[in-house]
Image (spheres, grey):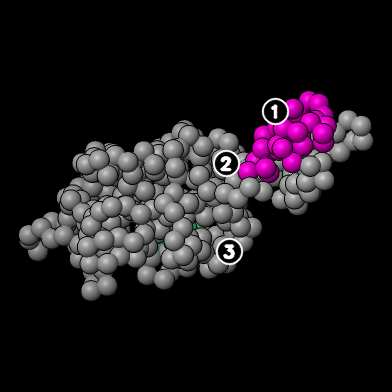
Amino acid sequence: MNDSQIVDLFIIKALKENREGYISGEGLAAAASISRAAVWKHINNLREKGYKIEAVSRLGYRLTSSPDALLPEEIIPILKTKFLGEKIAHRESVDSTNALAKSLAEKGEREGTVVVAEAQSRGKGRLDRHWSSPMGGIWLSVVLRPKILPLEASRFPLLAAVAAAKAIEKLGIEPEVKWPNDILINGKKVCGILLELSAQADKIDYLVIGFGINANFKLSKIPQEVRDRATTLSEALGKKIDRRRLVADLLFELELGYRHLTEGGWKDILKDWKKRSTMLHQEISLNTLYGEVKGEFVGVDDFGAIRIKLSEGGVKTFAAGDVTVRKRLT
Ligand code: BT5
């Protein structure tokens, strides 16, 4: 974060703590160790971001409303993380937060940086599928640099799904996880996760984990063919959610899980994931790049791959694919 952003954060915090009254420009300048002209510049900058700040001569400034946006000024003060989200790059609109996070990571961006956008024009799913990303959702990517073998990276979609599910549960909803990277509510997709990485043979340069959470928008904002299999948190709850709180909870859960994973806690993460899976032990079909396989979903292996007891006999493991339930066995 640069000095100017730190001052913005400081001013917003001071204004929020004094909503009832006015803070003088002089007082703000002294507290932030900047000139009164600089205070004026920062106030204007914050107004451009959507903050409504009243200015009354001889009295000073008063915050009358904050924008409904995932601005660092809104998220950082409520974060409970140690390093995740220390730096947040916010965009009104971007092609893809994963693409931006990757280009920042290529330039050496440190671990824990978050990219978040109000809308995406070219949101990505797996296999270059399109991810609909209208205003009101949470389109967010995290840069990580784990010291693990590239082969262990396939644990991250499950780790991320558990973190997102736990954050959503705080809203009083019981979501389910769907292998490998989806979160569903009543069988409909509310969140998708996209993991991208850059690695050498024995070392990960960086990982980008992208979360697409359908938070506060009407389903009519996404294409018909997607709509039937999708839902939003506001639809599930019948009211808008506080997106800032959800982002803070998600980053907290992700950091907790990440630390646990690097300390050897994979088994617990998998247990947490399985607890939230309703497809385990069901008859499923898995669509892979090499065709369709059918059988019972019997488990997830040590590297996050799906294990299927094939209808024609034997158990096989698959690293990628799309699952559909064919028959509920229980
Ligand atoms: C995913 O892919 O589920 C991963 C989605 C990750 C999106 C995030 S947003 C922030 C970050 N930046 C990015 O550019 N991407 C990540 P997959 O399992 O392949 O699912 C894609 C399929 O989900 C599409 O083919 C549609 O059928 C469906 N879909 C598209 N948009 C959707 C939405 N908003 N809600 C529910 N389903 C959707």
- Identify the residue at the far left of this view: 314
Q: Which mark sits nearer the N-terminus, 2 or 1?
A: 1
Query: Residue 324 falls in which quadrant of the image?
Result: bottom left
Q: Which residue is mark 1?
A: 17
Q: Position of residue 57 (x, y in %)?
A: 92, 35
Residue 10 painted magenta: yes
Q: As rendered, which of 34 and 301 lies closer to the eye? A: 34
Query: Residue 272 falls in which quadrant of the image?
Result: top left
Q: Specify whether 154 is left or right of 176.
A: left
Which amino acid type is shown beneath numbered disc 1?
A: Glu
Q: Which mark sits nearer the N-terminus, 2 or 3?
A: 2
Q: As rendered, which of 46 and 222 lies closer to the eye? A: 46
Which amino acid type is shown beneath numbered disc 3?
A: Val
Q: As rendered, which of 68 and 263 lies closer to the eye? A: 263
Residue positioned 32% across, 41% down in the render: 259
* Residue 75 circle label: 2
Q: Which residue is mark 3?
A: 94
